[in-house]
Amino acid sequence: MITIWLRAIRIRFLFASVIAVINGLTISFWKYGAFDITYAILTCGGVICLHASVDLLNDYWDYRRGIDKVTKKTKFSGGTGILPENLLKPKTVYVVGMSFLLLGSLIGVYFVAIRGITIAIILAFAILSIYFYSIKIVNVGLGELFVAIKSAMIVIGTFYVQTGLIDMDALYIGIIVGTLSASVLFVNSFPDYDADRDNGRRTLVIILGKKRGAKLLPLFVIVSYGLILLGILLGYTKLYSLISFISIPVAVSAIRQLEENNQKVEKLVPAMATTLLYSRITGILLAISLLL
Protein backbone atom coordinates (compact mmCIF):
# COMPACT_ATOMS: atom_id res chain seq x y z
CA MET A 1 0.00 0.00 0.00
CA ILE A 2 2.88 2.38 0.75
CA THR A 3 4.26 1.75 -2.74
CA ILE A 4 0.88 2.60 -4.26
CA TRP A 5 0.66 5.89 -2.36
CA LEU A 6 4.23 6.83 -3.29
CA ARG A 7 3.24 6.22 -6.89
CA ALA A 8 0.07 8.25 -6.39
CA ILE A 9 1.91 11.35 -5.19
CA ARG A 10 4.46 10.97 -8.04
CA ILE A 11 7.41 11.09 -5.70
CA ARG A 12 9.96 11.59 -8.50
CA PHE A 13 8.31 14.93 -9.36
CA LEU A 14 8.15 16.16 -5.75
CA PHE A 15 11.88 16.82 -5.99
CA ALA A 16 11.16 19.85 -8.20
CA SER A 17 9.54 21.62 -5.26
CA VAL A 18 12.34 20.53 -2.92
CA ILE A 19 14.88 22.08 -5.32
CA ALA A 20 12.88 25.32 -5.26
CA VAL A 21 12.97 25.32 -1.44
CA ILE A 22 16.72 24.62 -1.46
CA ASN A 23 17.32 27.56 -3.80
CA GLY A 24 15.28 29.82 -1.53
CA LEU A 25 17.36 28.70 1.44
CA THR A 26 20.69 29.17 -0.33
CA ILE A 27 19.80 32.72 -1.43
CA SER A 28 18.80 33.71 2.11
CA PHE A 29 22.06 32.32 3.49
CA TRP A 30 24.18 33.84 0.70
CA LYS A 31 22.70 37.32 0.95
CA TYR A 32 21.92 37.64 4.67
CA GLY A 33 23.48 34.66 6.44
CA ALA A 34 19.95 33.63 7.48
CA PHE A 35 19.14 29.98 8.09
CA ASP A 36 16.63 28.67 10.61
CA ILE A 37 16.55 24.86 10.50
CA THR A 38 13.06 24.60 12.03
CA TYR A 39 11.60 27.03 9.51
CA ALA A 40 13.43 25.20 6.71
CA ILE A 41 11.99 21.81 7.70
CA LEU A 42 8.47 23.20 8.09
CA THR A 43 8.69 25.02 4.77
CA CYS A 44 9.87 21.89 2.96
CA GLY A 45 7.17 19.78 4.62
CA GLY A 46 4.43 22.26 3.74
CA VAL A 47 5.58 22.58 0.13
CA ILE A 48 5.72 18.79 -0.27
CA CYS A 49 2.16 18.49 1.09
CA LEU A 50 0.88 21.13 -1.33
CA HIS A 51 2.71 19.52 -4.27
CA ALA A 52 1.32 16.09 -3.37
CA SER A 53 -2.19 17.55 -3.25
CA VAL A 54 -1.81 18.88 -6.82
CA ASP A 55 -0.84 15.45 -8.13
CA LEU A 56 -3.58 13.57 -6.26
CA LEU A 57 -6.32 16.00 -7.27
CA ASN A 58 -5.01 15.93 -10.85
CA ASP A 59 -5.36 12.15 -10.90
CA TYR A 60 -8.87 12.39 -9.46
CA TRP A 61 -10.15 14.97 -11.93
CA ASP A 62 -8.45 13.38 -14.95
CA TYR A 63 -10.11 10.08 -14.03
CA ARG A 64 -13.50 11.73 -13.56
CA ARG A 65 -13.20 13.40 -16.97
CA GLY A 66 -12.17 10.13 -18.60
CA ILE A 67 -8.74 11.40 -19.68
CA ASP A 68 -6.73 8.78 -17.80
CA LYS A 69 -8.96 6.01 -19.18
CA VAL A 70 -7.88 6.66 -22.76
CA THR A 71 -4.41 8.19 -22.50
CA LYS A 72 -1.36 6.03 -23.09
CA LYS A 73 0.49 5.97 -19.78
CA THR A 74 4.28 6.30 -19.64
CA LYS A 75 6.71 6.62 -16.74
CA PHE A 76 6.44 10.39 -16.94
CA SER A 77 2.98 11.16 -18.34
CA GLY A 78 -0.61 9.97 -18.52
CA GLY A 79 -1.22 10.16 -14.78
CA THR A 80 -0.19 7.54 -12.25
CA GLY A 81 -2.69 4.92 -13.43
CA ILE A 82 -3.78 4.08 -9.90
CA LEU A 83 -7.45 4.84 -10.56
CA PRO A 84 -7.83 3.16 -14.00
CA GLU A 85 -6.09 0.12 -12.49
CA ASN A 86 -8.49 0.19 -9.50
CA LEU A 87 -5.63 0.30 -7.01
CA LEU A 88 -7.35 3.04 -5.05
CA LYS A 89 -10.88 4.43 -4.97
CA PRO A 90 -11.49 7.87 -6.52
CA LYS A 91 -13.09 9.22 -3.35
CA THR A 92 -10.09 8.10 -1.28
CA VAL A 93 -7.67 9.86 -3.64
CA TYR A 94 -9.78 13.02 -3.50
CA VAL A 95 -9.99 13.00 0.32
CA VAL A 96 -6.26 12.39 0.75
CA GLY A 97 -5.50 15.08 -1.84
CA MET A 98 -7.65 17.58 0.07
CA SER A 99 -6.05 16.46 3.34
CA PHE A 100 -2.58 17.21 1.98
CA LEU A 101 -3.89 20.60 0.84
CA LEU A 102 -5.25 21.27 4.34
CA LEU A 103 -2.04 20.15 6.05
CA GLY A 104 0.13 22.28 3.78
CA SER A 105 -2.22 25.21 4.33
CA LEU A 106 -2.01 24.85 8.12
CA ILE A 107 1.78 25.05 7.96
CA GLY A 108 1.32 28.12 5.78
CA VAL A 109 -1.05 29.66 8.34
CA TYR A 110 1.64 29.22 10.99
CA PHE A 111 4.05 31.25 8.87
CA VAL A 112 1.32 33.84 8.23
CA ALA A 113 1.08 34.25 12.00
CA ILE A 114 4.80 34.95 12.37
CA ARG A 115 5.58 36.64 9.02
CA GLY A 116 2.35 38.41 8.10
CA ILE A 117 0.46 39.42 4.96
CA THR A 118 3.09 38.52 2.36
CA ILE A 119 2.93 34.82 3.26
CA ALA A 120 -0.88 35.08 3.36
CA ILE A 121 -0.91 36.28 -0.27
CA ILE A 122 1.44 33.50 -1.39
CA LEU A 123 -0.61 30.91 0.52
CA ALA A 124 -3.90 32.13 -0.94
CA PHE A 125 -2.47 31.88 -4.45
CA ALA A 126 -1.22 28.36 -3.73
CA ILE A 127 -4.54 27.09 -2.36
CA LEU A 128 -6.67 28.52 -5.17
CA SER A 129 -4.33 27.49 -7.98
CA ILE A 130 -3.86 23.97 -6.61
CA TYR A 131 -7.58 23.34 -6.40
CA PHE A 132 -8.38 24.82 -9.82
CA TYR A 133 -5.28 23.54 -11.63
CA SER A 134 -6.84 20.38 -13.08
CA ILE A 135 -10.33 21.75 -13.71
CA LYS A 136 -9.55 25.24 -15.03
CA ILE A 137 -5.90 26.23 -15.44
CA VAL A 138 -4.73 23.42 -17.73
CA ASN A 139 -7.84 23.82 -19.87
CA VAL A 140 -6.72 27.18 -21.20
CA GLY A 141 -3.05 26.53 -21.92
CA LEU A 142 -1.75 28.00 -18.66
CA GLY A 143 -0.30 24.83 -17.12
CA GLU A 144 3.32 25.74 -17.80
CA LEU A 145 2.79 29.30 -16.58
CA PHE A 146 1.21 28.00 -13.37
CA VAL A 147 4.14 25.66 -12.71
CA ALA A 148 6.64 28.45 -13.38
CA ILE A 149 4.85 30.85 -11.03
CA LYS A 150 4.40 28.12 -8.40
CA SER A 151 8.11 27.30 -8.37
CA ALA A 152 9.05 30.98 -8.28
CA MET A 153 6.73 31.59 -5.34
CA ILE A 154 8.22 28.64 -3.46
CA VAL A 155 11.66 30.25 -3.81
CA ILE A 156 10.31 33.68 -2.81
CA GLY A 157 8.23 32.27 0.06
CA THR A 158 11.13 30.21 1.43
CA PHE A 159 13.40 33.26 1.27
CA TYR A 160 10.79 35.43 2.99
CA VAL A 161 10.22 32.90 5.79
CA GLN A 162 13.96 32.91 6.51
CA THR A 163 14.61 36.65 6.20
CA GLY A 164 11.30 38.50 6.46
CA LEU A 165 12.27 40.36 3.27
CA ILE A 166 11.18 40.56 -0.36
CA ASP A 167 14.29 40.70 -2.52
CA MET A 168 14.98 40.83 -6.27
CA ASP A 169 17.55 38.07 -5.83
CA ALA A 170 14.83 35.61 -4.74
CA LEU A 171 12.50 36.70 -7.52
CA TYR A 172 15.24 36.34 -10.12
CA ILE A 173 16.31 32.86 -8.99
CA GLY A 174 12.63 31.93 -8.71
CA ILE A 175 12.09 32.75 -12.38
CA ILE A 176 15.00 30.51 -13.36
CA VAL A 177 13.76 27.60 -11.23
CA GLY A 178 10.24 28.14 -12.55
CA THR A 179 11.41 28.01 -16.15
CA LEU A 180 13.21 24.73 -15.47
CA SER A 181 10.08 23.18 -13.95
CA ALA A 182 7.84 24.45 -16.75
CA SER A 183 10.07 22.81 -19.37
CA VAL A 184 9.47 19.41 -17.74
CA LEU A 185 5.68 19.81 -17.72
CA PHE A 186 5.76 21.05 -21.31
CA VAL A 187 7.58 17.98 -22.65
CA ASN A 188 5.53 15.60 -20.49
CA SER A 189 2.33 16.87 -22.09
CA PHE A 190 3.29 15.62 -25.58
CA PRO A 191 2.18 11.98 -25.07
CA ASP A 192 -1.19 13.17 -23.68
CA TYR A 193 -1.94 15.27 -26.78
CA ASP A 194 -4.83 13.18 -28.16
CA ALA A 195 -6.46 12.34 -24.83
CA ASP A 196 -6.27 15.94 -23.59
CA ARG A 197 -7.57 17.39 -26.87
CA ASP A 198 -10.46 14.94 -27.12
CA ASN A 199 -11.56 15.73 -23.55
CA GLY A 200 -11.62 19.48 -23.87
CA ARG A 201 -8.20 20.48 -22.65
CA ARG A 202 -6.11 23.11 -24.38
CA THR A 203 -2.55 22.58 -23.25
CA LEU A 204 0.28 24.57 -24.77
CA VAL A 205 1.20 21.61 -26.98
CA ILE A 206 -2.39 21.36 -28.26
CA ILE A 207 -2.48 25.10 -29.00
CA LEU A 208 0.81 25.01 -30.91
CA GLY A 209 0.67 21.50 -32.33
CA LYS A 210 3.38 18.89 -31.79
CA LYS A 211 5.70 19.97 -34.57
CA ARG A 212 5.71 23.66 -33.68
CA GLY A 213 5.59 22.85 -29.99
CA ALA A 214 8.81 20.84 -30.20
CA LYS A 215 10.58 24.00 -31.36
CA LEU A 216 9.65 25.71 -28.09
CA LEU A 217 11.87 23.53 -25.86
CA PRO A 218 15.07 25.27 -27.06
CA LEU A 219 13.49 28.57 -25.94
CA PHE A 220 12.94 27.21 -22.42
CA VAL A 221 16.57 26.11 -22.32
CA ILE A 222 17.96 29.37 -23.72
CA VAL A 223 15.92 31.41 -21.23
CA SER A 224 17.19 29.34 -18.28
CA TYR A 225 20.86 29.54 -19.22
CA GLY A 226 20.52 33.12 -20.40
CA LEU A 227 19.09 34.23 -17.04
CA ILE A 228 21.88 32.47 -15.18
CA LEU A 229 24.48 34.21 -17.34
CA LEU A 230 22.79 37.62 -17.13
CA GLY A 231 22.41 37.15 -13.39
CA ILE A 232 26.18 37.02 -13.00
CA LEU A 233 26.42 40.51 -14.51
CA LEU A 234 23.53 41.81 -12.41
CA GLY A 235 24.71 40.20 -9.17
CA TYR A 236 21.72 37.87 -8.81
CA THR A 237 23.81 34.76 -9.46
CA LYS A 238 27.54 34.12 -9.03
CA LEU A 239 30.40 33.41 -11.38
CA TYR A 240 30.32 29.96 -9.79
CA SER A 241 26.82 29.58 -11.25
CA LEU A 242 28.47 28.73 -14.55
CA ILE A 243 28.75 25.18 -13.15
CA SER A 244 25.04 24.92 -14.03
CA PHE A 245 26.11 24.87 -17.66
CA ILE A 246 27.43 21.35 -17.09
CA SER A 247 23.91 20.24 -18.01
CA ILE A 248 24.12 21.73 -21.53
CA PRO A 249 24.85 18.34 -23.22
CA VAL A 250 21.79 16.89 -21.45
CA ALA A 251 19.64 19.80 -22.61
CA VAL A 252 20.87 19.44 -26.19
CA SER A 253 20.07 15.73 -26.09
CA ALA A 254 16.54 16.46 -24.83
CA ILE A 255 15.96 18.99 -27.62
CA ARG A 256 17.18 16.55 -30.25
CA GLN A 257 15.08 13.68 -28.91
CA LEU A 258 11.91 15.79 -28.83
CA GLU A 259 12.53 17.18 -32.31
CA GLU A 260 12.97 13.68 -33.76
CA ASN A 261 10.21 11.85 -31.88
CA ASN A 262 7.47 14.37 -31.06
CA GLN A 263 4.95 12.46 -33.20
CA LYS A 264 5.72 9.04 -31.68
CA VAL A 265 4.27 8.49 -28.22
CA GLU A 266 6.24 5.32 -27.58
CA LYS A 267 9.53 7.09 -28.36
CA LEU A 268 8.91 10.18 -26.23
CA VAL A 269 10.02 8.59 -22.95
CA PRO A 270 13.76 9.32 -23.52
CA ALA A 271 12.97 12.97 -24.27
CA MET A 272 10.91 13.27 -21.08
CA ALA A 273 13.55 11.53 -18.98
CA THR A 274 16.35 13.69 -20.39
CA THR A 275 14.39 16.93 -19.90
CA LEU A 276 13.72 15.96 -16.29
CA LEU A 277 17.42 15.21 -15.78
CA TYR A 278 18.45 18.53 -17.36
CA SER A 279 16.04 20.44 -15.12
CA ARG A 280 17.17 18.71 -11.92
CA ILE A 281 20.91 18.98 -12.63
CA THR A 282 20.67 22.67 -13.52
CA GLY A 283 18.51 23.51 -10.48
CA ILE A 284 20.73 21.64 -8.02
CA LEU A 285 23.95 23.07 -9.40
CA LEU A 286 22.47 26.56 -9.32
CA ALA A 287 21.71 26.15 -5.61
CA ILE A 288 25.19 24.78 -4.91
CA SER A 289 26.81 27.66 -6.81
CA LEU A 290 25.18 30.22 -4.53
CA LEU A 291 26.95 28.69 -1.52
CA LEU A 292 30.41 28.53 -3.09
Image: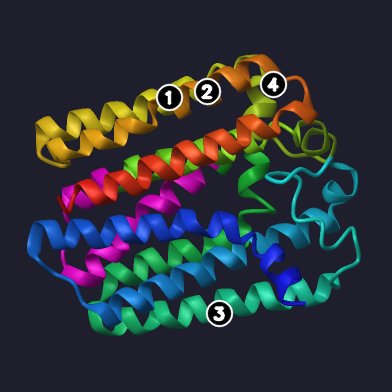
Q: Of residues 130 and 278, which is closer to you in this image? A: 278
Question: Which residue appears at 86% of the width and 73% of the height?
Answer: 89
The label on residue 253 is: 2
The kind of residue on which mark 4 rests is: Asn
Question: Which residue appears at 61% of the width and 21% of the height?
Answer: 257
The kind of residue on which mark 3 rests is: Leu
Whether residue 46 is situated above or below residue 151 in the rendered picture = below
Marker count (numbered)? 4
Q: Is there CB contact under 8 Å for labels 2 and 4?
A: no
Tell which circle, 4 or 3, labels the residue nearer the N-terminal end. Answer: 3
The label on residue 249 is: 1
The kind of residue on which mark 2 rests is: Ser
Q: Is there CB contact under 8 Å for labels 1 and 2?
A: yes
Please tell me in which quadrant of the rendered image residue 13 appears.
bottom right
The secondary structure type at the circle numbered 3 is helix
Q: Is there CB contact under 8 Å for labels 2 and 3?
A: no
Residue range in magenta is: 144-173
* 189 sits left or right of 124 in the view: right
Q: Is residue 141 visible?
A: no
The label on residue 262 is: 4
Q: According to the image, label 3 marks what residue?
A: 102
Mark 1: few/some/many CA within 10 Å (<14, 14-19, 20+): few
Tell which circle, 2 or 3, labels the residue nearer the N-terminal end. Answer: 3
